[in-house]
Image: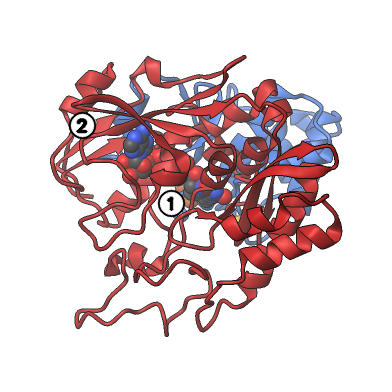
Amino acid sequence: MQKFEYVSPTTKEQAVALLGENWGDVEVLAGGTDLLSLMKDYITTPRRVVNLKGIAALSGVRYSASGLRLGALATFDDVLSNTAVRRNYPAIWAAVEGVTSPQIRAMGTVGGDLCQRPRCWYYRAGYGLLAKDETGHALVPDGDNRYHAILGHNSGAYFVNPSSLAPALIALAAKIGVYGPKGARQVDAAEFFRAPGGDGEREYQLSPNEIVTEVLVPAPGGMKNATYEVRQREALDWPLASASVALKLTGRNVGAARIALGHVAPVPWRAGAAESALVGKAVTEQTAAAAAEAALADAKPLSRNAYKVQLARVAVKRAILAAAG
Amino acid sequence: MKRLLDVLREDCRLTGTKEGCGEGECGACSVIVDGEVVNSCLIPVCQVEGSSVTTVEGLALNDQLSPLQRAFLEYGAAQCGICTPGMLMSAHALLLRRPHPIRNQILEAIAGNLCRCTGYTKILDAIAAVSSGNINKPDQSE
Ligand SMILES: Cc1cc2nc3c(=O)[nH]c(=O)nc-3n(C[C@H](O)[C@H](O)[C@H](O)COP(=O)(O)OP(=O)(O)OC[C@H]3O[C@@H](n4cnc5c(N)ncnc54)[C@H](O)[C@@H]3O)c2cc1C
Ligand code: FES
Ligand code: FES
């Protein structure tokens, strides 16, 4: 690992003052479960590392009448042990429970989950976010793309967003609290992620001198919600596909729906077509399957990942049925 | 920069803690920090300033193996042994929290520890034996 300066501020103001103007110059450290691997493999070589763990204001999970606040430093364990989360936000609870390693649950944080870098093996092997060889040829389309994107890869980014939490937050219309030199701002979870155009960019809407401080989830207000994940291994791995669903039922029919897929595109994938397909209908096996069909209608699998299309359909259908049930 | 794992092995010469993957995917490096099992390969040592760290070397008391360690010996829960220190730490943390776990709770507690040799059955048996008191006294083991 390259040498770096280590700083441990105690306030968010101090933290952002220590950040840099360019990505990669300074890195933020929370639980370290992703950053340490990236540094060890020289995927990032910061000159300074800013440890957020000393900033008490960024921790904690709090539920009140106005909704849920997850501090950026809340660990997966903090979220799982909160009974209000389990009761009111099963979509969040199930997404977090899917991270099965007790070690990662004890260390990994909410902010780190949202800002973790792609697990694409070309990226992790040093070929960059867009995974190109030295002649500029994209390696993923005819390479080993079995875990790559099946949607949203026309921008040239083929990795999948690795966050399990993000689809649940999008389905629940959460906002992400950000702090930077100009003060605090909030971004809709649905707008937070982006497909980067190159290695000088990130997969989320932060400036290099901003940090995530919290996640704010509106009061459930009768929104029934669920997450369903399809995994190859139950432990020590990311899902192959997942879906989070939030439904507002009026009588037996769906009045409003928000559906987001995970691990299928460079961003957590909002499935508008599936939402429209469901609204106004009662939730049945048939209507859930039709919505799942609509969610994947535009899928463009790569040479080795057509199987993910069906997995994603199953995830959408089962998440809808679980939310309604 | 040194990771907690490097300091334990190289500076403290506590080589019980192993390095497998170095990326959080195997649990061979598991230690207990302030009561929680964590991967020491993912922790910069500066982040544990002021914390209490227990490694596998901390399980034996006065040169007597702990009941859990004896159970691993007795039930053949180790083959190559690379996963064993981490497995012991996860099991130890579980038994501190929950002295009589059901089998599923044992499975969940060791979900972050990969074993390529044993097939896990003997490991589960050994941990269950400690919780049910079903192991020999120290003087009888060997
Ligand atoms: C074996 C294994 C299995 C896993 N399985 C899953 C899974 O199934 N689902 C899943 O979602 N994740 C999974 N993960 C990933 C894990 O959830 C993330 O690594 C973790 O959430 C990151 O949190 P952290 O606090 O450790 O982040 P760190 O490693 O400290 O940071 C990660 C990145 O986020 C940035 N960052 C951290 N906090 C902030 C902040 N507050 N503001 C701005 N930037 C920040 C850092 O600069 C860094 O780039 C797995 C990881 C491992 C090792
Ligand atoms: S060496 Fe730390 S988890 Fe594998
Ligand atoms: S005994 Fe060999 S890895 Fe577990």
According to the picture, the residue beneath numbered tag 2 turns out to be: A6
Q: Position of residue A284 (x, y in %)?
A: 85, 55
Q: Please tell me which residue is depicted at 70% across the width and 62% down the height of the picture.
A: A292
**Which image quadrant for residue A208?**
top left
Q: Please tell me which residue is depicted at 31% across the width and 63% down the height of the picture.
A: A129
**Which image quadrant for residue A21?**
top left
Q: Please tell me which residue is depicted at 52% across the width and 76% down the height of the picture.
A: A300
Specify whether disc 2 shares its chain with disc 1.
no
User: Callout 2: residue from which chain?
Assistant: A
Tell which chain the image draws in red.
A
Classify mark 2: residues with Cα within 10 Å, few (<14), some (14-19) or many (20+): some
The residue type indicated by label 2 comes to Tyr
The residue type indicated by label 1 comes to Glu
Classify mark 1: residues with Cα within 10 Å, few (<14), some (14-19) or many (20+): many
Q: Is B77 placed left or right of A47 in the picture?
A: right
According to the picture, the residue beneath numbered tag 1 turns out to be: B23
**Which image quadrant for residue B99?**
top right
The front one of A5 and A196 is: A196
The front one of B120 and A261 is: A261
